[in-house]
Amino acid sequence: MVGHPQRPVAKAPKDIVKVNIADRQPVREIGFATENYTEPFVHFDFMRYLRNSVFVTAMATLITLLTNSMAAFALSKYKFRGRDFTMLLIVGTLMVPLSVILVPLYSVVSAVGLLDSLWGVILPTVATPTGVFLLRQYMLTIPDELLDAARMDNASEWQIYWRIVLPLAAPALAVLAIFSVVWRWNDFLWPLVVLSRKELYTLQVGLNTYAGELNVQWHYILAMTVVTMIPVVLVFVFLQRYITSGIAGTGLK
Amino acid sequence: MGRITLTNIDRAYGKVKILHDISLDVGDGEMLVLVGPSGCGKSTLLRLIAGLDRPTGGKIEIDGIDVTEVSAARRGLAMVFQSYALYPHMSVRQNLAFGLENIRMPKAEIDQRIAEASRMLEIAPYLDRRPGQLSGGQKQRVAIGRAVVRNPTAFLLDEPLSNLDAELRISTRAELAALHKRLATTMVYVTHDQVEAMTLADRIVVMRAGKIEQVGRPLDLYNAPANLFVAGFIGAPRMNLLPVKVRSASATQVDVDGPGGLSATVAVDGSALKPGDDATLGIRPHDIELSDGGKGAVEAHVTLAEALGPETVVHATIAGDNRLVAVLKHQGVETRGAPLSLVLPPERMHLFDSAGLRVASR
């Protein structure tokens, strides 16, 4: 995109330099710069960052689905004192943004020795109030008689959760899985805070290395941003049906 | 064996008492039907027997063993739910196998039991379908099948026929009766339909507002209802109840006067009654006859006549606002507003005292 033509430099102010107008060269040009895509793959450790991102996204999503569905099961199917208050408390944490709890969260992660580890990125993000709320609302629609029938069928409470409630909550789980993938893939601030070793960077943090203090290499940042968007776009293309039906079903936006 | 004994069962939700001091004995192999209007606590009682809910007081025993604190799974009972409660994400076969897999039964025995139950209930052709692909009647059979394969000590059925259409309900009712006969297993059956209760039960338990009103064989309840509630609940159309005054009472008979010149002598033990007492006279619609011009007839006015073919259901009033329903065994010519002479045979009359309790026969 950017050319560097030789500029004639005047030796003395009185000299007259004549330049043939036909010899001029363009300073800038427009064209496809595929090297912006290929260069980072060679110099920038793209594959390692991709692997980290995929690991974080996959593990965080799996654990999110497991823990959130367990919480939702308890909050929708068991009657205990303080159940509604607990639900309110969980949903209430939606009002607290990450930047507010960044410092205490950092201290906690540091204290348990998860700094500079991918698990330090994964674990604090797995309990999402949105996920608990979404799954609980869905599980409320599963009739209690099914659970009673399973109890008569000698099923333990774990089996009821694992073999009855989870399969029946599959549509809501799919929605949460999609949300979780998108959230974790796009996470930037928290991984940036936790990870300091370069080989642990996720894609989004890795891209940040192109933004220096004095110089931002926009051509690489923008090109790699396009690349990092591909998985999320694919998720939407293939699971769009679940997203729309899930959102319509839960009344969530 | 499948003998279930309830002793002084109470159930309260907070301060609201749902069941009051229920004591009941269900014999081995018996079909006991719990019947009552909705909200009377019959389903709650069934859930207590099943172990899905715990009583706040009292004791539940199965075959002499106290199971009050035993979990539902360990009581060895099987339940058929009103909504069938089939697992929608499993095939019919998996639905039947689920309870057996949970007790780690060998695969071969599970297959054998499923084959047996599916032959008995004729559900073999759709063992690999999901419940969503079945009709109501088929779902019903699968729900019963799921209980049958467990080979339980007793079946608990919670209004199993209420989601079926009228025709299917009658045929399924007959099949249930046949199934009970074949399996000879104790069944506790909850319904609000007194016809179901009458046709299926060995014994009926009539409940109202968390209390047992009467326990007895179907015809005993029909012929000798213990109180006004049972009298009105058992039998269709309901028993006619007329307010009367006691004219004279003795240990062998009671003379009463009622509306519309009604005067009758009922052969009951009236030693607890005094002349002038308020009482209620009951007579079933089928027992009322058309007068042949003789004495003792009551003058009524027809408000509606429903000709059903073999019989005519006549709705009438006597002396203004006392309603009376008579089922007359002929194709009637009664028209609205026409006067009608009816005979209420004294030997078919039931007498209830001012507290609503039956005045016993001699």
Image: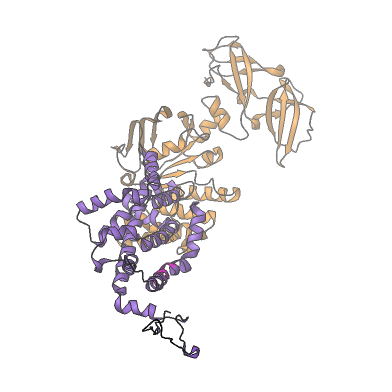
Chain colours: A purple, B orange
Which quadrant holds residue A222?
bottom left
Residue A1 in the figure: left or right of residue A46? right
Residue B67 in the figure: left or right of residue A36? left
| Residue in the picture at 56% in, 31% down | B233
Q: Position of residue A36 (x, y in %)?
A: 38, 78
Depth check: A127 or B90 in front?
A127
Magenta stretch, main secondary structure, is helix
Range covered by the magenta-colored residues: A227-232
Q: Position of residue A29 (x, y in %)?
A: 46, 81
Residue A66 seen anywhere in this rendered image of the structure: yes
Q: Tell me: residue B25, above or below residue A142.
A: above
Residue A230 located within the stretch drawn in magenta: yes
| Residue in the picture at 75% in, 29% down | B302
Residue B184 seen anywhere in this rendered image of the structure: no
Q: Position of residue B313 (x, y in %)?
A: 70, 35
Q: Position of residue A139 (x, y in %)?
A: 43, 50
Residue A213 located within the stretch drawn in magenta: no
Task: Indicate the quadrant containing the N terminus of chain B: top left, top right, bottom left or bottom right.
Answer: top left
Depth check: B100 or A143 in front?
A143
Q: Tell me: residue B348, above or below residue B91.
A: above
